[in-house]
Amino acid sequence: MSTQQHLVVVITGASDGIGAEMAKQLAVKHKVRLALVLAARNEAGLRAVAEVCKRFGSVCLLVKTDVGVESDCRRLIRETVETFGGIDILINNAGKSAQALFSEVDNLGWYQELMRVNFWGSVWCTHAALPYLKESKGKIVAVSSLAGLIGVPGRTAYSASKFAMNGFFESLRTEVQEAGVQVTLAYPGVVATRIRYHGYNAAGEAAGSSGLKEEQAMPVEECAYQIIQAMEQNQREVVMTAKGKLGRWLRLIAPGLVDKIAMAALKKEVRPQ
Ligand SMILES: NC(=O)c1ccc[n+]([C@@H]2O[C@H](COP(=O)([O-])OP(=O)(O)OC[C@H]3O[C@@H](n4cnc5c(N)ncnc54)[C@H](OP(=O)(O)O)[C@@H]3O)[C@@H](O)[C@H]2O)c1
């Protein structure tokens, strides 16, 4: 622990979805021993999450952060260290989705924006936090996606940003393990949050609907639980769902079949004609 009193955990994208749920589950588990640093843009969302966590005795620091802005990421880490004296765990969870066929995109500006949020946001936070994580022999979590292991149609931007995350954190793991820092990559499948509704469409606007079949989406509680378990057990990675685990290996021997399975996950109206 970085301070006598607290386990200091920074969570990006903590105002909603998986990040908010991880914050609550950690508060239930660690209660008064926990200092949570909750980061995202929506301050009302952060306050609502903090209210729940405080009921279990956890201390919360809210830092309004756009992870697509480098100076915000650096300020997040600076304020954490100024307040709590160090960092034990950094959970890079903030992320944005997108669903668009590449040939239907006119302006690629939002591809760059997605990369800033999903990839660079994690890199900037991790870069700023690493000296403190080395000091505490702490942990880094990177929330990637099954779409970061297998290219998914309609997800050229999203898959690229998540593949980039994997490459970065896989490499970093080998660099920091001697210093005692653990890196866990999480690969959720389809989880029941609003991410696809807020994600970009081909025009770079909020999609307002999901292009995926959502019926069998994993409950957000289960996803958050699996990530926390993997992190606490110092696992290298957690690949969620049997389909995800199977798809990864099937890809080596029958990649064409995996392409077909990925296409079948899309609703008909968003498939290439
Ligand atoms: N849900 C799934 O099916 C699924 C599957 C695989 C992987 N994932 C990954 O899991 C992570 C969490 O997703 P979720 O499903 O929980 O999504 P969500 O419910 O939409 O929540 C996303 C969180 O990220 C934050 N965020 C978005 N853009 C941000 C920015 N520029 N700066 C700071 N925070 C930002 C949002 O907060 P503000 O809007 O307040 O900033 C929110 O707290 C993402 O990295 C996502 O790619 C999700």
Image: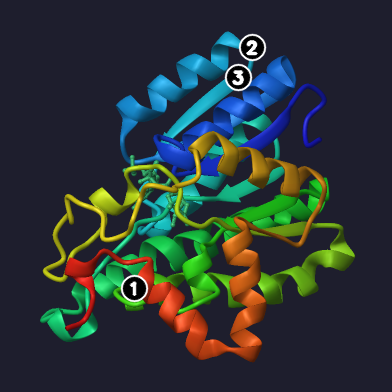
**Which of the numbered marks, if any, corresponds to residue 155?**
1
Q: Indicate whether 43 appears above or below 187.
A: above
Q: At 17% across and 83% down in the image, what residue appears? A: 273
For disc 3, the neighbor class at 10 Å (few under 14, some 14 to 19, many from 20) is some
Q: Is mark 1 within 8 Å of ligand 1?
A: no
Callout 1–callout 2 Cβ contact below 8 Å: no
Q: Secondary structure at mark 2?
A: loop
- In the image, is 94 to the left or to the right of 273? right
In this view of the protein, which residue sits in the foreground, 25 or 116? 25
Report the amino acid beneath label 1: Arg
Residue found 26% across the figure and 67% down from its top: 99
Residue 59 is marked as 3
- Point out the image quarter for the N terminus: top right
Element at label 3: strand
Mark 3 vs mark 2, foreground winner is 2
Q: Nearer the viewer, mark 1 or mark 3?
A: 1
Residue drawn at x 64%, y 88% is 252
Q: Nearer the viewer, residue 47 or 23?
A: 23
For label 2, the crowd category at 10 Å Cα-Cα, with few meaning under 14, some 14 to 19 and many 20 or more, is some
Q: Which residue is mark 2?
A: 57
Image color mode = rainbow
Q: Amino acid at mark 3?
A: Val
Observer-side mark, 1 or 2, equals 1
Q: Is 108 placed left or right of 17 in the picture? A: left
| Callout 3–callout 2 Cβ contact below 8 Å | no
- Front one among 67 and 163: 163
Residue 145 to residue 57: above or below = below
The image position of residue 65, as x and y in percent, is 39, 44
Categorize mark 1 by other alpha carbons within 10 Å: few (<14), some (14-19), many (20+): some
Q: CA distance from mark 1 to mark 2?
A: 41 Å
